[in-house]
Image (spheres, helix red, strand yellow):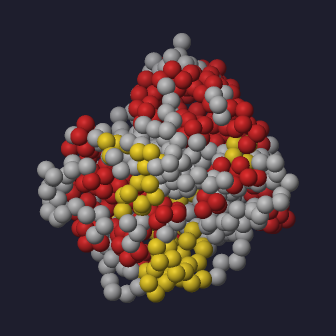
Amino acid sequence: MSELYGYVGSIVRINLTESTFELIPTSKYVPKYIGGRTVCNRIFWDEVAPGTGAFDPENKLIYMTGPTGATGIPTGGRSVFTGISPNSYPEQYAWSGIGGFVGAELKFAGFDGFILEGKAPTHTRILIQDGTVQFLPADDLWGMLVHDTQDALEKIHGPKVQSIVIGPAGENLMRNATLTTSNDNVAAKSGFGAVFGSKNLKAISILGSGAVKPADIPRVFELRRRMGDPYMRKTPVVPETTHGMDGNMIPVEGGWGRGQVACSHGCNQHCNRLMMGIKSAFSDEKINQVEKCVGIFAYGYKEDCSWRPSQTYETPENHVLACKMLSCEPPEPGLDDPYFEDLMKPVRGDIVNFWKPDFDKGAVMMNMCNEYGIDKWDVIVWYFTWLSMAKQEGLLDDLDFGMEVDVENEEFVRYFLDMITYRRGKYGPIFAEGMARAIRTLGKEKYGDAIYHGRFSQELGGKRLDLPVSLETAWGHSYHWQGRGFEGTISKPGWLATSLELMTSTRDAQTIAHHHDKYTNFLQYKDDPCHSDLLLDAVVLDENKAEMKDSVMCCDWQSPDLWWPEMESVMYTAATGIPMTQEELNEAAERSRLLFRAIIIRNFGRDRDMEVNAIFPTMQYPDAHGETVTWEDWNDFVDLYYEKRGWDKATGWPTRETYEKYGLADVADELEKAGKLPQ
């Protein structure tokens, strides 16, 4: 690594307690651990002991870029945080991906990543600039909203600075708090904004004057032409007169402007929606903001997402990624595809009756999440759906929030988000702990498991399909492609796959591991998915590709491409010049997956009983087609998966042979000493 390509050569350890930093050579970990989440997993395994809590100074928040970052390879600008998540229930090791330009700027400043450890004695911000780290006071920034903080840092350091900041939610240790960087890009799902707050850290600002050199520039140009085709398009601002989708569509008085923006450096795929001229929650001026996919439902949620089989199952003639179907028209018929009509047939979402469309109210909800630094997903898919369902079922009559609960009322939206962000009143501190903990504090039998009677399946002719008032599934997270609740119209093989991926994770896995498979495989297992080796092959593909995406660095908008399986290895080699076959890259993904597994076994006591009992109960409520899964079939499915992974069926623990196969004998040794290696 005397001449570096892709990587820049150093990881910086930042000790907040002592206000010191030291450099670690990136070559200590790569290429064996690739980059991104794979390196994070190795560092956490080596450095964080069992018994550490999310808000303990000993919790290390590890941030890594990937080798494709800042090279111009599309989607390579993403990056990832890992650490003990305060949002997962119980607290466990998790990850959170983030877009924006901060990853590229960190590499320009000379670092592939950083390790945050300890706790600052006072409110602090950090400046990383060209190989150095400065610890600066942040009292003047503490209490500021997210955008005000970013603006203040730009005034201090100039417009080129890239900053990761928290808002009031992170300062007040709200467990759903986000880390935010440019373009309203956030690391959201794991609540790491609250970890920043627990460390007295308001912001990390980055300035770099260096450059990142890819090894094979002609191949980078080839990747830019091919990746994203045919979805690359011009992105002018266009006028829109409506907002929403399916049964949530609403006319917008006066209209609004829409543009499409890339989330990270060098990306040619403009998949985030820029909304222009919408209502602010904090001033009389119209504002612009970037909206992610879930944001559509802030504006109206009478009907769940529709779904097409082509969002999950592909043919050579018709293969698109899940999110692309939401923004791209399906191809015209006439293609030489015998399955065209099956793939393009829409499946209507359930009628859920959560709230009527209201453009201004939705804009206020989104703006408050951005400015306070709160995970929009939890707010839209869990907090407010729970408030709606619980209110309709009469469960809130004994709770005095200080204002009438009315999710249709913009003033209540403001009141509730302010209450939980600043921990105001009796219930603010309870709900600031996240929905999973709040429900248990209030009483799960009544406030989590009570049945909502307002869900109706359009696929079954309007049949009522009961659902709990809380859309909780496993590990303190809400539904996402699990066949119920949000995006619940996916068919049984799909939700079995995504439920298995969630079961062996610590948080919602579907932000990086949307289920993909070939339609010809689906036709073989659709009638008995729980006993299908083909379906399990697809699950392993989903999981391994997710590890690659968070290590090489690309995103779910582009990967996996089932008809270009070598894409990630081509990206890696073009960036680094290190020859890497897809088989070798898959081995690195398996190694990363095993490290993650070892961490949650050693540090958090994970085993088969814990996993199966966490995920199985939610699958007993019917999906949009009225289907469930039996205990016997689900356990058969789990057995087959554990066997495929080389894990012991009784405990769910990988065997020594499996660890050693992927170069992790030292991990097996430590687990054996801890009594967590199967005999």
| Quadrant in which residue 429 is drawn | bottom left
At a point 29% along the width and 72% down the height, the residue shown is: 410
Image coordinates of residue 284 in percent, x first then y, are: 33, 86
Image coordinates of residue 631 in percent, x first then y, are: 47, 23
In the rendered structure, the answer to whether residue 336 lies left or right of residue 286 reads right
Is residue 577 in view from this perspective?
Answer: no
Q: Is residue 238 above or below residue 88?
A: below
Count of labels in the image: 0
Residue farthest to the front?
Answer: 461
In the rendered structure, the answer to whether residue 383 lies left or right of residue 65 reads left
Image coordinates of residue 387 in percent, x first then y, are: 29, 55
Query: Toward the viewer: 429 or 602?
Result: 429
At a point 57% along the width and 46% down the height, the residue shown is: 490
At a point 55% along the width and 80% down the height, the residue shown is: 240
Residue farthest to the top?
Answer: 679
| Quadrant in which residue 150 is drawn | bottom left
Query: Toward the viewer: 604 or 405?
Result: 405
Query: Toward the viewer: 647 or 5?
Result: 647
Is residue 278 in view from this perspective?
Answer: yes
Image coordinates of residue 174 in percent, x first then y, are: 30, 56
At a point 51% along the width and 35% down the height, the residue shown is: 627
